[in-house]
Image (cartoon, rainbow, N blue to C red):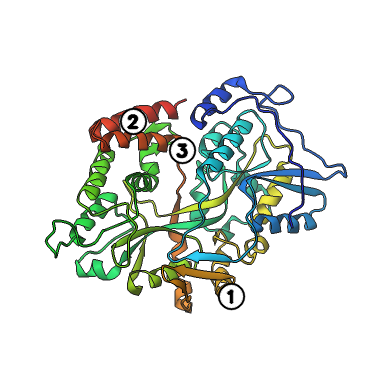
Amino acid sequence: MMKNKKKTKLAAGCVSLALMTAITACSSGGGGNAGGNANAEQTAVKTEDGKTVVSVSVMQNDRFLQAAEASFEKAHPDIDIQINAAVATPEMGKVVRRAGGGQDPETEANREKFVNSVNTELMSGKGADIIAVQDLPFDKYAEKGLLADLRSLMKEDKDFNLQDYYEGVMDAVTKDGKQAALPIRFSLDIMLASQAELAGAGVSVDDSKWTWKDFADIARKLAKDEDGDGKPDKYTMSGMSKDRMLKLMVESSYEHYVDTAGKKASFDQGDFAAMLENLKGLYDEGLVNDGMPGPGQQSFGHMNLMMPMDLVMTPQLMFEGKGQVYQTPSGGEAKGMTYDSDLMLALNAKSGAKQEAWAFMKYLLSAEAQGTPGIMGFSVRKDMTAKQVEESMKMFENGNLKISGPDGEISPPTMTDEDIKTIVDTIPRIKRFSGDDSAIMKMVLEEAAAFFEGRKSAEEAAKQLQNRATIYLNE
């Protein structure tokens, strides 16, 4: 059970009206800490009995963090981990999985509140020792020296072996040899297709290099109008609004359009305008829509797989057992499979308890912590993948994990040694983190809306987006 701890209130030297403007305003020297110097390292906080406090700021606490807190403090009685959550911890209970993967969404209002709060504290030289940054533009914070380089701490720590972890997962959040964020667990972004339909249309997919233009071309090859009503008999994809589809397209191609380190954007090179035209065509032609699909009404599905066994289980449950997993298309050169994370931590560069904070972060990556029963998400450890599949099967057997479909509960499939090998062999294909800058994405959606509504041509929207993104990146 989580201890009842009093959260220390931190004074803020800057007021974050919006994430985009706050970074510039605060970095220009408007902020300050209690000592009057926003660049000064914080003093380590001690409890009344002399323990070093390590504060952790997260969107939402969970059973994994609670268990890790208790175990770590037992092994380190001189350290007091204080987890401060913006949203109340969910109640304990059975986990219900949706067929095809999925997770309970957090509200945008709570997310925005958390992001703005952390941003204000960081930019004023304050903030928690450890910060959940999966929803934050951590690359920009790292460039401003607000986050510690974790890769250097890894190299200095003789008890830490980077080879124990999936290289692509770690390297995806490493820039120029410096790692600002540490994924504790992750989910896998995929496209799932009807293997039978692709084969029937003579279509083969090389997902190591396919683009969104390739996807549009395939959609048109699969389209059939057997009833002669002028509309395709089946959607290529369904349940996708234009904004959601565009966001997916840009997220999967983000580094193609945005060079954060180089402070450059490439939306005006022609391919972004072509992407907008292609996207509009998919909807105009009835190949993609935002309605919820019924059984057998779509050829492709995009989803985020939450557990290793989903890599085998989901294809068996979809498309009459003939589903095929592909990496998501990109706008330019494909970089590999993409992952997301609901728990990615960074170390505050101003923390006065860096060594203690790193010790806790390192523990979260240990075999003991990563092997916590019921942990939701792929483990970042290579030696945990097969064990996670076995643990999931045990949870199915004892009723603590269930799969729900349109017609009720679904019996889990069996897992063979070959299935587990397929899972283990797939994860090294991961090379990208799905994160993007929310300020840039807001611009993308605004300029795209002007195109979709006929107020701008695709080229005009791309040019205006280029101008806005360039100004923002150089602030």
Amino acid type, residue under disc 1 in the picture = Lys
- Quarter of the image for residue 469 reads top left
Asked whether residue 177 is in view, the answer is yes
* Contact (Cβ within 8 Å) of mark 1 with mark 3: no
C-alpha gap between disc 1 and disc 3: 39 Å
Q: Which residue is mark 2?
A: 466
Q: Which residue is mark 3?
A: 438
Asked whether residue 269 is in view, the answer is no
Q: Earlier in the sequence, mark 3 or mark 2?
A: 3
| Residue 420 drawn at (x, y percent) | 48, 73
- Quarter of the image for residue 293 reads bottom left
Judged from the image, the secondary structure of the residue bearing numbered disc 2 is helix
Q: Nearer the viewer, mark 3 or mark 2?
A: 3
Q: Earlier in the sequence, mark 1 or mark 3?
A: 1
| Residue 391 drawn at (x, y percent) | 58, 71
Amino acid type, residue under disc 2 in the picture = Gln
Q: Earlier in the sequence, mark 1 or mark 2?
A: 1
Judged from the image, the secondary structure of the residue bearing numbered disc 3 is helix
Q: Residue at x 63, y 65 (%)?
A: 371
C-alpha gap between disc 1 and disc 2: 51 Å
Foreground residue among 347 and 282: 282
Q: Residue at x 52, y 32 (%)?
A: 19
Judged from the image, the secondary structure of the residue bearing numbered disc 1 is helix
Q: Residue furthest left?
A: 228
**Apparent side of residue 219 relative to residue 151 in the rendered image (left or right):** left
Pointer 2: residues within 10 angstroms few (<14), some, or many (20+)? many
In the image, which disc is placed on residue 270? none
Pointer 1: residues within 10 angstroms few (<14), some, or many (20+)? some
Amino acid type, residue under disc 3 in the picture = Ser
Q: Which residue is mark 1?
A: 394
Foreground residue among 64 and 337: 64
Pointer 3: residues within 10 angstroms few (<14), some, or many (20+)? some
